[in-house]
Image: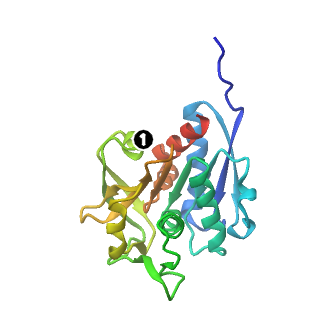
Amino acid sequence: MEISPVKDTLRIALVGDYNAGITAHQAIPLAIDDAAAVLELLADYDWLSSTEITSAEDLVGYDAIWVVPGSPYKNTEGALTAIRYARENSIPFLGTCGGFQHAILEYARNVLGWSDAAHAETDTTGRMVIAPLACSLVEKTDDVELRPNTLIAKAYGQPVISEGYQCNYGIAEAFAAELDSGDLRVTGWDDNGDIRAVELVTHPFFVATLFQPERGALAGKPVPMAQAMLRAARG
C-alpha cells in the first residue's frame, strides 16, 4: 500500500506588523512550537509585515496563514489579501483579534459584495461591519459558548471555554444578521449573545476568533486552535 508523504516542515505565515511589546506576538511562537511538539511535526513561521504583502504571490508556498492581533495594520490591503488568498485557495487560516475583524471585512467586501464595507477603527465612511464594542474587552477574560460539531468545538473538546481579549472592536449589530444566511457561520458567542468566533463552512479550515487563544501559551498551556491549524496544514 502506498503511503502519502508527510511534509518535512510546515511553513506558517504570521501576517501582521510584529511588535515585541504586544502580548499576543510574544505568545504566538510559543503556541506554534508547543502545538508542533504535541503533533510530533516540524513547523517554521515567518512574520510577514502587512506592508510586505502586495499580491497573492507573496503567500505562495505557505501551508497555513495566521492573521495575528495588532491592528490597525500598517497596510490593511495586505492583511485582506492574505485572508482572501487563504479563503480562495483552501489554505488553513486562523485569524485572532484583528485577524477576526479583518476576516469579517474581507468576507463582506469580496463574498457578500459590500464594496463599501468598513472598519470603524480606520474608516470614516462606508457601511461599518466592524464597530466599537459596547464594553471594552482590553485585558479581559470571558466565557464563550461554542456551537457543537464545529472545528472550534472539536479543537477544544468542550462546550464552553474561557479566553482572554485585548480589543475594542467587534462585529457591528447591523451586520451580524447577515451572517445567518451565508457560508461564514457564527460558532462562538459570549453570555450576551455577542459574536466571538466564526468559521467558513465551505473551507477545510477557516476559523477566526475575537479572543486571543494564543495567550494561554504564556502560562504554559496548550493552545487548541494552534494545534488544530497545524493539524489541518499537515493534511
Regarding residue 126, the answer to whether it shows in the image is yes
Residue situated in front as seen by the camera: 165 or 71 = 71
Residue situated in front as seen by the camera: 131 or 40 = 131
Above-or-below relation of 154 to 144: above
Tell me: 222 left or right of 27.
Answer: left
- Occupied quadrant, residue 42: top right
* Residue 225 location (% of width, % of height): 48, 47
- Residue depicted at x 71% and y 37%: 9
- Occupied quadrant, residue 235: top right
Q: Name the residue under label 1.
A: 155
- Residue depicted at x 69% and y 25%: 5
Badge 1 element: helix
Amino acid residing under circle 1? Ala
Above-or-below relation of 233 to 88: above
Above-or-below relation of 231 to 57: above
* Residue 27 location (% of width, % of height): 56, 55
